[in-house]
Image (spheres, rainbow, N blue to C red):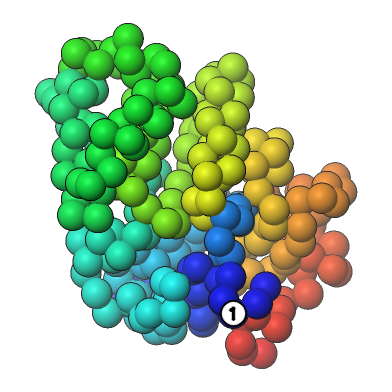
Amino acid sequence: MSADTVRLSVTNVTAGYGKLQVVNGISLSVGRGEALALLGPNGHGKTTLLRAITGLGPLTGGTVELDGERIDRLGTPAIVERGLMHVPQGCTLFPRLTVGESLNLAGRLKRARRVRSANLELVLGLFPKLVERRGQPVGAMSGGERQMLAIAMGIMANPSVLILDEPTLGLAPKVRHEILRTLLDIRATGLSLLVADGDVDFLFGLADTWCVVELGRTVGRGTTEEKPTQEQMMAMFVGGAHAPTALAAGPDEEDGHA
Ligand SMILES: Nc1ncnc2c1ncn2[C@@H]1O[C@H](COP(=O)(O)OP(=O)(O)OP(=O)(O)O)[C@@H](O)[C@H]1O
Ligand SMILES: [Mg+2]
């Protein structure tokens, strides 16, 4: 990826909770209009990494750049205003607001205001269910509808890079498919995506490249043109004991440490 096409660049990031270091030096980059899939066993640091990137959680080392600008010392509101938006795992929404009010709220960010009506038209076109539910309180919606709203709110913030943490968690296959189709449509508009999820078919349908996080390090990367073998799949979900040599080769050149 040439330097001028890189949107998000994460270099040697460490993060954790108090004395517990969970992310042990991860590097990755996402180009314009590209999608990077983050996989790995549960509890190995994907969410911690994503939260550190957007300032929602503590980052103890390394750098994060968005379009060439260091953003790792800015707070989350300033990071979002620069175009990096995060839809968190287990999307926390405001249950008493209606769907319409929630979308308007996300569209109030400074960078989003001037394109609010165009983005509203876009998300309602992408998620027709939200049109039906527009006047309803969020608390009355199904899990799938709430996830659609969370993604729609992410788009209303008018980001250049959208981070999605477990967007299909707990959803039925049909809803997963709808979300996948919608995210592919959004990607086609030039938005870059960084997505952690447990559904490999979903991730491989969406992304160009993948990266496996194990024990807070990247232990494998590849392109989604080539499907992983059954053995590599095992490594992605249960960790190193099952990792083939290629996948468990340790941090690669992008990690910047031995
Ligand atoms: N707020 C917290 N305080 C202390 N430890 C935490 C906190 N959040 C997560 N952890 C710990 O950090 C480690 C990594 O958790 P994290 O949520 O980043 O993993 P994950 O890869 O996103 O897992 P999953 O696939 O289940 O979403 C786990 O051991 C977890 O228990
Ligand atoms: Mg997680």
Q: Is residue 118 left or right of residue 32?
A: left
**Residue 173, located in which quarter of the rendered image?**
top right
Q: Is residue 146 visible?
A: yes
User: Residue visible at 27% across and 79% down?
Assistant: 73
Q: Is residue 256 left or right of residue 126?
A: right
Q: Is residue 75 left or right of residue 254?
A: left
Residue at the top extreme, as displayed: 132
**Quick check: 30 above or below 39?**
below
Q: Secondary structure at mark 1?
A: helix
User: Residue visible at 65% across and 77% down?
Assistant: 2
Relative image position of residue 221 (x, y in whole percent)? 72, 64
Which amino acid does the dot numbered 1 rest on?
Answer: Ala
Q: Nearer the viewer, residue 225 or 94?
A: 225
Q: Which residue is mark 1?
A: 3
Relative image position of residue 75 (x, y in whole percent)? 21, 69
**Quick check: 52 above or below 19?**
above
Q: Residues within 10 Å of mark 1 (few under 14, many from 20)?
A: few
Q: How many marks?
A: 1
